Amino acid sequence: MAGMPLSDDYPVRRVPVVTYLLIAANVAVYLMSPMSALAAWYGSDLLARECFAEAYLMRWAAVPAELLSGHQLDAPVCGGAEFTKIPWLSAVTSMFLHGDGFHLLSNMVYLFVFGPVVEDRLGRARYLVLYTAAGVAATYAFALTAGDPTAPLVGASGAISGVLGAYLAVQFRSRVITLVFFVLPVRLPGWALVGTYFVLQYFLYISASLFPGGADTGVAYAAHVYGFIAGVVGGVLVYRIRWRAGTRLSDVH
């Protein structure tokens, strides 16, 4: 998308604690990882840091072959590090890993803008469940469609795509101030912004699937697409159930 969202005009009714905690957790994990230049305890030697990063990703990232088989890969790890990994749990831990600062920043901006709205509309507990479920669904969808079954998946993109999908389901009438081409601030309908995001991700996903080697772009478009779909479905179901429950209570009173 040729733009960056800055703010949503929906007036949230309470502090979005869950969203802020998720952002804080993502930032903290990145700063403590070997991918961060601030993590001085990994040393300054580039080869050594690459070695630590490889071992770190193999331990905490989601690897398609492991997710689908349920067994940890027996592949050698740089530096000879040994660990025991629970494959299904990596579908959750991978959501808090990021390859570099830009990857982290772009994800957190979207979560900061759209997360509070969805959290306010669904409630904190339901929002956290939806975020996690969408992220896990996106991770397994990526595993089923990955070109390289040993390539690790990292990032909160699948879960945040779920948040965008839920936003489309529960608060599409809002308007979002967006930096178009990262320069010009424009006030756009929320549904148009997140809808454009999905269409673009779907187009890139299909394009990558059709061309030889296209699946090896380094971007998990499948996770974005299926995470978004999971968010739409989850948002509709959760919001509808909550609305019906509220209607019943109001009828009783």
Image: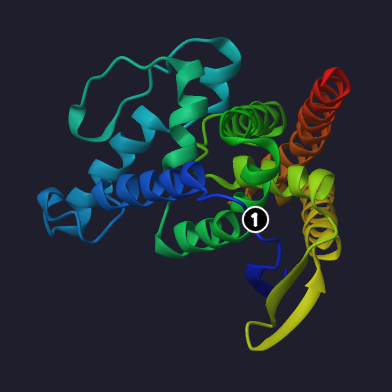
On screen, residue 156 versus residue 240, left or right, reads left
Q: Quick check: 87 above or below 176?
A: above
Q: Nearer the viewer, residue 68 or 154?
A: 154
Residue drawn 22% across the image and 51% down it: 49
Q: Which residue does the image show at 76% across and 28% down from the upper left?
A: 238
Identify the residue at the far top of this view: 70
Residue 128 coordinates in the image, percent (x, y)? 56, 33
Q: Residue at x 41, y 44 (%)?
A: 21
Question: Along the horizontal axis of the image, is 219 left or right of 153?
Answer: right
Task: Please indicate, yes or no, whether residue 168 appears anywhere in the rendered image.
Answer: yes
Image quarter of the N terminus = bottom right
User: From where the camera sits, is residue 217 visible?
Assistant: no
Q: Position of residue 174 (x, y in %)?
A: 79, 63
- The quadrant of the picture occupied by the C terminus is top right
Pick the front one: 203 or 134: 134
> In terms of image quadrants, where is residue 192?
bottom right
Q: Which residue is mark 1?
A: 114
Crowding near the residue tagged with mark 1, few <14, some 14–19, many ≥20 C-alpha atoms within 10 Å: many
Residue at position x 50%, y 51% in the image: 15
| Residue 247 occupies quadrant | top right
**Is residue 28 rendered to the left or right of residue 225?**
left
Scheme by which the image is coloured: rainbow
Residue 204, image x and y in percent? 78, 55
Q: Amino acid at mark 1?
A: Phe
Helix, strand or loop under label 1: helix
- The image shows residue 151 at horizontal and vertical percentages of 52, 36
Residue farthest bottom in this picture: 184
Against 8, residue 61 (above or below) is above
Q: Nearer the viewer, residue 216 or 144?
A: 144
Dividing the picture into quadrants, the one containing residue 65 is top right
